[in-house]
Image (cartoon, rainbow, N blue to C red):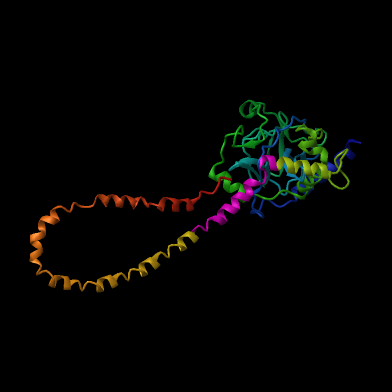
Amino acid sequence: MRILRSLPALMAAVLLAALPLSSPAQLSIGIGVTIGSVPPPIPVYVQPAAPYPNYQWTPGYWGWGSAGYYWTPGVWVRPPAVGLLWTPGYWGARGSGYGWNGGYWGASVGFYGGVNYGAGYYGSGFVGGAWSGNQFRYNTAVTNVNRTVIHNTYVNKTVINNHYNNSRVSYNGGRGGTTVKPTSGQITARQSGRAPTTDQKNQAQFASNDRNQYASVNKGKPALTTSQKPFSSTNKPPNSAPVTTADKQDAQKQSKSNGASAPSNKATTTQNNKPAPATQNKKPAPTTQNKKPAPTTQNKKPAPTTQNKKPAPTTQNKKPASQGQKPPAGGKGNAQGNGQGKPPAKNGNNKPPQH
């Protein structure tokens, strides 16, 4: 019986060994939806045992669906290639909202927002195991495995003290979020990461269709936090129930009150509003320069005729009258130079509202 039980494990190991080694990125992993409210804390869960050799643990996370935040249960999956490790996704502060940074496969575990996802993903790096050639060795101090089929194990308890933190915060930045920041190398690694597998996508898809996984229903404490095998048409979440119209309407009301969609919309529209250069078109005040044909006043300069009248030296006798002509006090009329209406023009530089 033990031999029969080990056959599936042996076949899985052979298949994984035949997988190609990691190749260049096939898809850039970027920022997706932006939400105005923070996701609930990471729920406490018990990791199921690894079913086959070389399978990788992908921790659960809060996704965003038709009825708000929903919990995608953590699951063991077959990696796309030998030597690859999973870097979880995370919610990160983005203006006045929170953007989702998708997870990816790579040669090493990168930045995942400092979020403590548990089971070796304690906020920085991964201590649940490591690749040794074509075989993955599991650290049973933090990873649960089926010892009847998995024998590549070791125990390192020191990593728990060095990496573990008690925080259950599920987002990075903003008020109350984790404060760590990615290095330039980690940013590049995410951009060139390898996309989630079909099993991982199915896991999220089935979870998003089950109303029991939504925080609006389970109050942030889902009953189903993990699954040993990925969801599929033959392995659906137990007690799964479809998302109702009422669930969606409640989520929309919450989104509006929290301004969930506002950040992403404002981010784009404000950039389009930047055509304040249209105000620069109003600079055709050079038309006023056309009015400079005040040189016509220069034509009136034939006031030299007045010079002919200069033989009014007789007016010099009237010079005492000129002494009585005090300069008009109205010289302060230049104070209208306060027509510095130019400052209002600066209002054209409306800084785009932070998104």
Residue 273: in magenta span: yes
Q: Is residue 288 left or right of residue 57?
A: left
Q: Is residue 133 left or right of residue 285?
A: right
Q: Residue drawn 81% across and 35% down?
A: 224
Q: How far across and how far down the image is residue 185, in percent?
A: 55, 45
Report the label total: 0
Q: How far across and how far down the image is residue 75, in percent?
A: 77, 39
The quarter of the rendered structure image containing the N terminus is: top right
Residue in the foreground of this view, choosing between 36 and 57: 36
> Main SS type for the magenta part?
helix
User: Is residue 151 placed above or below 83 in the rendered structure?
Assistant: above
Q: How far across and how far down the image is residue 240, in percent?
A: 86, 40
Residue 65: in magenta span: no
Q: Residue furthest right?
A: 1
Q: Residue drawn 34% across and 51% down?
A: 336
The quarter of the rendered structure image containing the C terminus is: top right
Q: Is residue 48 visible?
A: no
Q: Quadrant of residue 283?
A: bottom left
Q: Is residue 45 visible?
A: yes
Residue in the foreground of this view, choosing between 16 and 333: 333
User: Is residue 182 placed above or below 316 in the rendered structure?
Assistant: above
First to last magenta residue range = 256-276
Q: How far across and how far down the image is residue 263, in percent?
A: 62, 46
